[in-house]
Structures are given as structure tokens and as C-alpha cells.
Image (cartoon, rainbow, N blue to C red):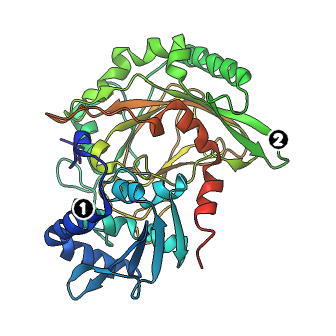
């Protein structure tokens, strides 16, 4: 059983010129996947996509059964203006259409921002050979070939092969009773302590605002380093077996973030909307990593349980949000204190806002090992400071679409 979907090596990513993209990358991609991408473009009914890149203009559109690239913008229904380094990242899946908007590296100057985002699955089909999701593409079967019970949860003593199969099929897992209540109390006290120390713009926290404009810290970064109570738990056998589940060699990433989910949040990234962890890019380099939510206080329908869309890790769809073409039903994972949820990094998920009780949760997880011959790359955009700056990402997404019309 495997959830490893990687098709690229990090060491191969490098700055590409516009000429290399036009003369080498796109012709090669069209020869390999042009028909697959055209099928996806027709299904999504996308408008021809034009690029303005430092004085060079070109358009991607469907012609017959294939996607083609032509100079100029005469046929373009949507036009994106970006730099050559942003184009280089886009064609190498280092940043997605969403990621470029979140970091203010693209401006939509013709059409709507949604037109640009709708092209994401088509571009991934063209550049990475991922079929654009169509209705009915994903089904669920258990090990015996029967319909899979998507409402099932597991205990620590349940069969690990069944768990691995469920995770590979559904893209998520709910494991009951991994930790004790007193252990979660200790972790919860650490969250409260470091939340109390947080200050705006400290680079150590995320902030949000309630309906009256009062700002409050909602996420502690570098929580693994800060919480001795957490470190003792995540290195225990009760937790580490999760990384061995699929046989892909997942390694604990030695990092965590401690979250509080207050009532009444109106602005900021406290209750994240539908998204994939690879939605900003790098699916072909990282997926599927395993993200684990440790339920410090438990979560139900009135305290903001995690929502997931089963099977979405097998669906190449538009991001962000819940793509309207996806015929997969969402589920809410209600947990008790000490439970652990696991989801693949390409599984669509969200944080439902609490309505009656706040909750606390720690997110940590496991990454895939490097592919043979690959080399790890350390980047500023994934630093603590860069992650802290995501607090105002909604404002930057809105700014990226201001030139559209």
C-alpha cells in the first residue's frame, strides 16, 4: 500500500528563463500530455489562458484534441501578468496558481481571478500528467472489494493493514484513544502558556480577530521545540507507528504547531476554509505527506471538528475551496480527547468554526523520505517568518485580483 504520488525531485528545480519555458518545457509537456490537458480544459470549460511575462506574451488554448501554445494574447480570455521567476515556479510546480496569488506574485489583468485558479488542474495535467478530475473518477472499496465504510474509526489494536488500506482509499484516518487525558492536559497548558506570551508580528504566532475587531493569538509556531510535554508523546511508539503505516518510509518531521479555536472569529486564518496542504504548490515533490491532528480537547459539531472530503487526495481539482465539480461528500471527524486524526497532504480538509465551545489541537506529522538521488532544499518561503506572514494571506489574495475585470 502506498500514498506516494511524487513525480519530481527537489534537486532538479532551478530558475528557468522564459525562452526555456517556451522552447523546451511547454513543447515537451504538450507532446507528452497535450491531449490529456485538452480533455481537462474542455471538461472545465476554461477560457484560453494568456501570460504576460516581462514583455513576452503567449496563450494556452485548446485546438482540436490537443492543448497548444501560441504567441500573443489575441485569443486569451484571461490574462495573468507575472515575472519570469514566478513563471518558472509555476511550470515546475513549486508554486501553484493559488500559491502565486497568496504571495502576490501574479496579477490577473483580464478575466476574473477564478478563471486563473480554474486553470490549476489543467496545468497540472499538462505539466505533470495528472488527469483532471471528472465526475465518478473516485470510488471506495475495502480490501475485499466491497463498499468502504467511510464512517469507521480505528483503535490502536485494530489491524494495521486495514488502516493502511482505509488511509490510501479515503485519504484520512481517525485513531481513537492514542493519548490519555492527563497527557493532553499537560499539552493544553503549554498551548495556553505560549499563547499568553504571543505578541503581534513576533513571527512566532498567527493572529485573528473577532467580530468586534479584537485581535488574539490562535496558533503557536515552533510548538515542538517549546513543549516538552508534546515531545515526550510524539516520540513514543503510540505515535511513531503512524509513519510506518503505508510502507512508504514516512519520517517524523520534528515540528508541530499548537492551535486554539476560539468562538466568534470573523477575520484571519483561525478556522481555515477548504484547502489541501499542497494547494500552494509542490504536490509533485511532497505528496503524500501525512498530517496528524492531536485532539487536545476533543472536537465535535459544536466545537469545530475537522472536516475532510474522502477521496479528494486522488482528485486533481481547482484550489482553494471545495471545487463544485467534485461529487465527493464531506465528512466531519468528531474526536475525543487523546484521539489522533491523520490526513494525506493532498486531502481536502477544513476547520469548522466552533459555535458553542472552543477547542485545542496540535498539528504535526510525517514527511516522505527523499527519493534516491534527491537532495533537500531549504527555502525562506517555508521559514517560520514566512509561515507567520500567512496570517494576512486573505488580504493578499484579494489584492492579486484587483486588476481583473
Pointer 1 residue: 20
Q: Secondary structure at mark 1?
A: helix
Pointer 2 residue: 214
Residue shown at 25%/78% (left/top)?
39
Q: Nearer the viewer, residue 130 or 311?
A: 130
Residue shown at 22%/89% (left/top)?
64
Which mark, residue 149? none
> Residue 126, percent across and down?
25, 67
Residue 16 figure quarter: bottom left
Q: Nearer the viewer, residue 379 or 327?
A: 379
Q: Nearer the viewer, residue 300 or 231?
A: 231
Residue 217 figure quarter: top right
* Residue 311 shows up from this direction: no
In the image, residue 226 sits, relative to residue 120, either above or below, namely above
Q: Secondary structure at mark 2?
A: loop
Residue shown at 51%/71% (left/top)?
114
261 sits to left or right of 324: right
Amino acid at each position: 500500500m502506498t500514498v506516494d504520488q511524487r513525480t519530481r525531485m527537489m534537486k532538479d528545480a532551478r530558475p528557468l528563463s522564459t525562452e526555456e519555458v517556451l522552447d523546451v518545457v511547454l513543447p515537451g509537456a504538450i507532446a507528452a500530455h497535450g491531449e490529456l490537458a485538452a480533455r481537462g480544459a474542455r471538461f472545465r470549460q476554461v477560457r484560453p489562458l494568456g501570460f504576460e511575462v516581462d514583455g513576452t506574451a503567449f496563450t494556452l488554448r485548446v485546438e482540436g484534441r490537443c492543448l497548444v501554445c501560441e504567441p500573443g494574447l489575441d485569443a486569451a480570455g484571461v490574462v495573468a501578468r507575472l515575472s519570469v521567476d514566478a513563471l518558472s515556479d509555476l511550470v515546475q510546480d513549486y508554486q501553484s496558481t493559488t500559491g502565486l496569488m497568496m504571495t502576490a506574485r501574479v496579477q490577473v489583468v483580464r478575466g476574473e481571478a477564478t478563471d486563473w485558479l480554474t486553470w490549476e488542474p489543467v496545468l497540472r495535467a499538462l505539466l505533470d500528467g495528472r488527469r483532471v478530475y471528472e465526475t465518478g473518477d473516485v470510488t471506495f472499496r475495502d480490501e475485499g472489494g466491497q463498499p468502504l465504510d467511510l464512517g469507521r474509526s480505528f483503535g490502536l489494536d485494530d489491524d494495521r493493514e486495514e488502516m493502511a488500506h482505509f488511509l490510501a482509499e479515503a485519504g484520512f484516518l481517525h485513531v481513537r484513544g492514542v493519548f490519555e487525558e492527563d497527557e493532553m492536559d499537560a499539552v493544553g497548558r503549554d498551548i495556553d502558556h505560549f499563547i499568553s506570551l504571543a505578541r503581534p508580528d513576533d513571527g512566532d504566532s498567527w493572529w485573528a480577530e473577532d467580530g468586534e475587531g479584537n485581535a488574539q493569538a490562535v496558533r503557536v509556531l515552533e510548538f515542538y521545540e517549546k513543549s516538552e510535554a508534546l515531545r515526550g508523546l510524539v516520540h513514543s511508539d503510540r505515535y511513531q507507528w503512524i509513519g510506518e503505516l503505508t510502507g512508504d518510509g514516512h519520517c517524523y518531521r520534528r515540528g508541530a504547531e499548537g492551535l486554539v479555536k476560539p468562538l466568534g472569529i470573523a477575520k484571519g486564518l483561525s478556522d481555515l476554509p477548504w484547502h489541501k496542504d499542497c494547494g500552494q504548490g509542490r504536490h509533485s515533490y511532497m505528496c503524500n505527506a501525512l498530517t496528524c491532528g492531536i485532539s487536545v480537547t476533543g472536537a465535535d459539531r459544536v466545537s469545530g471538528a475537522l472536516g475532510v472530503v474522502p477521496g479528494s487526495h486522488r482528485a486533481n481539482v481547482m484550489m482553494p475551496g471545495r471545487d463544485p465539480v467534485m461529487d465527493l461528500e464531506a465528512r466531519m471527524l468528531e474526536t475525543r480527547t487523546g484521539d489522533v486524526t491523520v490526513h494525506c497532504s493532498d486531502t481536502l480538509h477544513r476547520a469548522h468554526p466552533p459555535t458553542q465551545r472552543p477547542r485545542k489541537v496540535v498539528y504535526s506529522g510525517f514527511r516522505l523520505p527523499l527519493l534516491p538521488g534527491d537532495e533537500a532544499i531549504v527555502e525562506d518561503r517555508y521559514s517560520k517568518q514566512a509561515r507567520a506572514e500567512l496570517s494576512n494571506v486573505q488580504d493578499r489574495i484579494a489584492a492579486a485580483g484587483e486588476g481583473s475585470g
